[in-house]
Amino acid sequence: MGLRAMIRVKMHAAKTTLSRLVLQAQAGEEVVLMRGNKEVARIVPLDPPPSVPDRAPRSPGRLRGLIDFDDRLFDPYPPTDQSQWDH
């Protein structure tokens, strides 16, 4: 394992240069945040997101027979209910 560059940054400076520090961490540099002369945190890149596994293509009707709807679902609203939706 090779040596990586280490950057030590005081907290106040880190607040004003956070974007640059994140880019440096993504590039492989070790970024350590300091409070006074004490190391308190490290900025590290996240692991790359896992790739999405290959899936079978979705097909219409796959759930046919597994879901049952009440026939009233497709009936028009009664006028009293319909007036509540009109503004």
Image: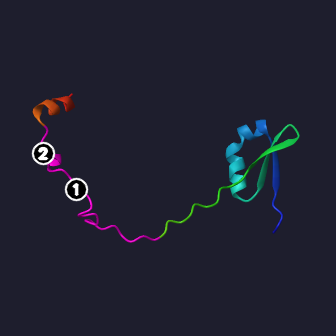
Say if 80 sits above or below 49 in the image: above
Mark 2 or mark 1, earlier in chain:
1
Residue 14 position within the rendered picture, expressed as x and y whole percent measured from the top left: 75, 41
Label 1: which secondary element: loop
Name the image quarter holding the C terminus.
Answer: top left
What amino acid is found at the position of numbered circle 1 in the picture?
Asp
Q: Residue sitting at 68 percent across and 55 percent down?
A: 45
| Residue highlighted by disc 2 | 75
What amino acid is found at the position of numbered circle 2 in the picture?
Asp
Q: Nearer the viewer, residue 28 or 71?
A: 71
Q: Residue sitting at 19 percent across and 29 percent down?
A: 84
Say if 13 sits above or below 68 in the image: above
Q: Residue 11's image quarter? A: top right
Question: Which region is colored magenta?
Answer: 54-77
Q: Residue sitting at 68 percent across and 52 percent down?
A: 23
Protein image colouring = rainbow
Q: Residue 2's image quarter? A: bottom right
Side (left or right) of 79 relative to 37: left
Name the image quarter holding the N terminus.
Answer: bottom right
Q: Is-magenta flag for residue 31? A: no
Residue 36 position within the rendered picture, expressed as x and y whole percent measured from the top left: 86, 37
| Residue highlighted by disc 1 | 68
In three-dimensional space, the C-alpha distance between marks 2 and 1, rounded to whole angstroms, equals 16 Å
Residue 59 position within the rendered picture, expressed as x and y whole percent measured from the top left: 30, 68
